[in-house]
Amino acid sequence: MSYHVRDVLESARDSAPAPRTSTDDIIARAGRIRTRRRLAAATGAGAACLAIAVAAVSGLGSAPATRQAAGQSAAQPGGITLPAGFTTVFGDARAGEYRIGPAGEVTSGYQEVPVYREGATWPGDDGKDYPLVDGMITVYRPGVYDPDSFRRAGSRTKLGPEFTVTVAGRPGVGHKVTYASAMVNMPGSPSASPSFDPAGGFTRVALAWEYEPGAWATYVPGDAQVNQSTEDAVAVAEALSVVPERPVRAPYRFGYLPAGWQPIAVTETDADLSTTVSELYLHDGPLADKDRAAVVDEVTPRTVKIFVSRSTLKDEAIRGKKGVHCYEQPVCTRVLGDYFIQVDGMFSNALPATEVRKIAEGLKPVDVTDRDAWVPVK
């Protein structure tokens, strides 16, 4: 995933948080990912992924994209059915200066499709520039998304009046969105409350639409300093492309999982989009139905994150040393060569360090550079 730092929403969790499905909540995820990337992880592995940043959903049933990859087609109204399991039907397309896709995180409740804007990049620690996620399309399974959550804003986001919109022939609503301008107000920052540009700052447009009865998709833009029109936002949503169903894969097999633990979210990212090419979240049992619309990330309760990256390890003691290296915290890094796999239970503390070690030692990696060798996640 290519995630980028956007610090526009609170990332702190209350003891009894509301479902994280509002516009602010979705965007907050990107801020958390960006913030962690700036900080060294306990393993020194730097911040994990940078490929999917803000979250949003795109409209199903779309007009032809400006450019589509071979074999892809634009979605037709009512023509999308999210496949079961960790498989996806979303591909790669373009709408003007925007690139839409390929698919990002896949869960039991939704699928994400990152949106990139031409010229917007982030610097990897390998000396390369990678496309910066500028927004997110999120397609929710029928009955999962509460459209009322789209109307909620937090302290770091201002929503304009709601207006009606049509996306690929389907009814929806939109808001103009203005983000807090003070970058110092990052999650965890002791500084004062967020400030907004008195002139209104840069305004972007968020959309939500019912792609079929009871099934919703959203497009939420990031906080880039670029104005965006409603027409541009609709064009992005309508450019969502559909390809033949394919599995989402990981560059390893599991040799050990604690009893009851299972994957709940998987992301497979092209190497030209991020230094982090794979992310997977394990959870103590399946997600409850009430949580299926909530963003799956490091602060999801009872989770362990596994990611595969070629970032530079900050812990010089293990850099270049193949094998499994664990810490007092429930975190282990498995060095493979140019890549490493990190098994991280530090944020949720849902498993003891001994169990995290067993997961890391039980992994059976394949050649990360050979996508044909990657294993479909069950």
Image (cartoon, rainbow, N blue to C red):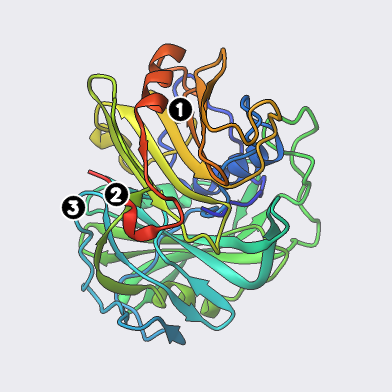
Q: CA distance from mark 3 to mark 2?
A: 17 Å
| Residue to which mark 3 is pinned | 84
How far from the left and from the top, in percent, is residue 43? 61, 27
| Residue to which mark 1 is pinned | 17
Q: CA distance from mark 1 to mark 2?
A: 35 Å
Mark 1 closeness class: few <14, some 14–19, many ≥20 residues within 10 Å: few
Mark 3 closeness class: few <14, some 14–19, many ≥20 residues within 10 Å: few
For image coordinates 44% across by 67% down, the residue present is 101
Residue 220 in sight here: no
Query: Relative to residue 225, is residue 88 drawn left or right?
Result: left
**Image depth: mark 1 or mark 2 in front:** 2
Question: Based on the displayed image, in which of its 4 quarters is residue 351 positioned?
Answer: top left
Query: Relative to residue 298, is residue 139 drawn left or right?
Result: left
| Residue to which mark 2 is pinned | 375
Residue 283 vertical placement versus 194 (above, below): above
Q: Residue type at mark 1?
A: Pro
For image coordinates 51% across by 66% down, the residue present is 115
Q: Residue type at mark 3?
A: Ala
Dot 2: element: strand
Decide: marks 3, 2 in contact (CB < 8 A)?
no
Dot 3: element: loop
For image coordinates 44% across by 39% down, the residue present is 20
Of labels 1 and 3, earlier in sequence is 1
Most foreground residue, 47 or 45: 45
Most foreground residue, 203 or 369: 369
